Image (spheres, grey):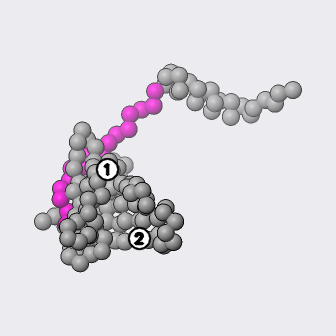
Amino acid sequence: MSQQKPIAEHKVLMARDAIAAGAHPAPAAVKVNPTPLVGTWLNADKSTPSLVKIILSQSGGDLFIEAFGACVPSPCPWGKVKATAFSSGVSSNGATSFLAHYDQGFADRTVTGSLFEGALVVDIFTVFKDNSGRDNYHFQDTLYRP
């Protein structure tokens, strides 16, 4: 004997199936204008052990980040990845913050940045996945446009 599903669950499943079949396509997401973040940003701390430079660019309305770590003799490129831009509220369109993710093989890094008084405050959260025994850590940098 089969059990009947509660009416609410049945309606949810029917709605999900209708959307999957294309009966009611989901509305397109509105992208936040990334322009206020775009540019080259340099670390204010010349002796930082973290990021020395970030280049934020846009293409087709999407935001991209290219980060450079502090290495000797020259900065280490982390690569270019897509970032998600955020505005300061639901009715503002200009980006004030971003979120990006780097999978570097040995570690996953989440990078966030927010504009504050003309500077870009960047937080890097590092999670090691190489069984090295190193602690996961957080680092904060303040970057400026040259």
Q: Which residue was labeled with disc 2? A: 138
Crowd band around label 1 with a 10 angstrom C-alpha radius: few (<14), some (14–19), many (20+): some
Relative horizontal placement of residue 38, taking residue 139 as reference (left or right): left
The residue lying toward the viewer, choosing from 136 and 88, is 136
Relative horizontal placement of residue 78, taking residue 28 as reference (left or right): left
Q: Secondary structure at mark 2?
A: strand
Image coordinates for residue 83, horizontal then vertical, percent: 33, 50
User: Total of numbered circles in the picture?
Assistant: 2
Crowd band around label 2 with a 10 angstrom C-alpha radius: few (<14), some (14–19), many (20+): few
Q: Residue at x 78, y 29 (%)?
A: 4
Q: Residue at x 62, y 26 (%)?
A: 14
Question: Label 2 amino acid?
Answer: His
Q: Secondary structure at mark 1?
A: strand
State the extent of the magenta-drawn residues as a range.
Answer: 25-42
The residue lying toward the viewer, choosing from 66 and 61, is 66
Q: Quadrant of the C terminus?
A: bottom left
**Given the current orientation, which residue lies at the most extreme right position?**
1
Q: Which mark is residue 81?
A: 1
Q: Residue at x 30, y 46 (%)?
A: 32
| Any part of residue 37 in sight | no
The residue lying toward the viewer, choosing from 44 and 21, is 44
Examine the rendered structure and indicate whether residue 59 appears above or below residue 136.
above
Q: Residues under labels 1 and 2: Cα distance?
A: 20 Å
Q: Quadrant of the N terminus?
A: top right
Q: Which mark is residue 43?
A: none
Relative horizontal placement of residue 123, taking residue 14 as reference (left or right): left
Magenta-colored stretch includes residue 34: yes
Question: Label 1 amino acid?
Answer: Val
